[in-house]
Amino acid sequence: MEYEICRFQDLPKSSIPVKERKKSYGKENHSRRLFLSTDGKLLYKTWDRDYVRRENLRNALDNDFYDIQLIPAFRALIFDEDEACSGYIMAAMDKKNIPPDKEFLEHIKKKTRISRYFFYDFWRANILLYERKPCLIDLESVYLLSEYEIRKKQNRDVYGQEGHLIKNPDYRNFIEKLYKELCWNETNKVEDII
């Protein structure tokens, strides 16, 4: 997916703070901030240089996980002066969370299979409406499929979160099955699993 680039220093100085989360787990920085443009049309999500998932979104975009069907409100990545990903910009959306419909679920499964990235925070709280279409939020919530078991263990042992890494049972079952099918032999090619 092609995307625009916005420089951190070029962001409007008069945006409205919406939410800030200051959080760390040991040495891992999980802090991030949301701002709304003064005209109410754009949302800016930014994070610190040492944010734990700083490059996840850029990697997922560059490896064709995301597309216009998954993130129709996406507008641009935000980079700092050293080319580090510092956040992203989306069009403002309806605040109503929606469960994924069958078409959206099947599409994210297809993109997961092809790109080998998975969206671990896939549940209704991270799907909003944009122009009557579902749109993922928290876009940095992606990892390589080969990291699935590591991320499950990290979620439990480091973050202290009991339960499943992926809350949506249909997507979770798909991920677990795909992960086992691939057995993560690095000689596998994308064409072998499509």
Image: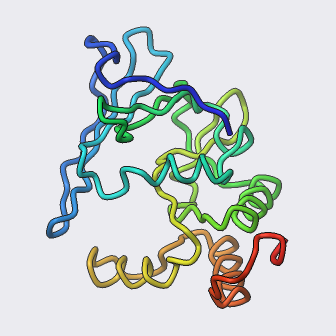
Of 121 and 115, nearer the camera is 115
In which quadrant of the rendered image does the C terminus lie? bottom right
Q: Position of residue 183 (x, y in %)?
A: 66, 91
Q: Residue at (46%, 54%) from the top-left corner? A: 56
Q: Residue at x 47, y 48 (%)?
A: 138
Vertical comparison of 132 with 128: above or below: above
> Which residue in the rendered view is the most extreme toward the left?
26
Residue 78 found in image quarter: top left
Q: Position of residue 64 (x, y in %)?
A: 68, 51
Q: Nearer the viewer, residue 27 or 105?
A: 27
Q: Is residue 8 left or right of residue 174?
A: left
Whole-percent x and y of residue 34? 34, 34
* Scheme by which the image is coloured: rainbow
- 169 on left or right of 12: right
Who's the residue at 76% across and 70% down the image? 190
Q: Residue at x 31, y 31 (%)?
A: 80
Residue 181 in the image, given as x and y percentages of width and height: 73, 88
Nearest to the observer: residue 65 or residue 107: 65
In the displayed structure, 151 sits above or below 136; it is below
Quarter of the picture holding the N terminus: top right
Q: Report the side of 13 relative to 113 (left or right).
A: left
Q: How many marks?
A: 0
- Look at the picture and state if 189 lies above or below 95: below
**In which image quadrant can residue 7 be found?**
top left
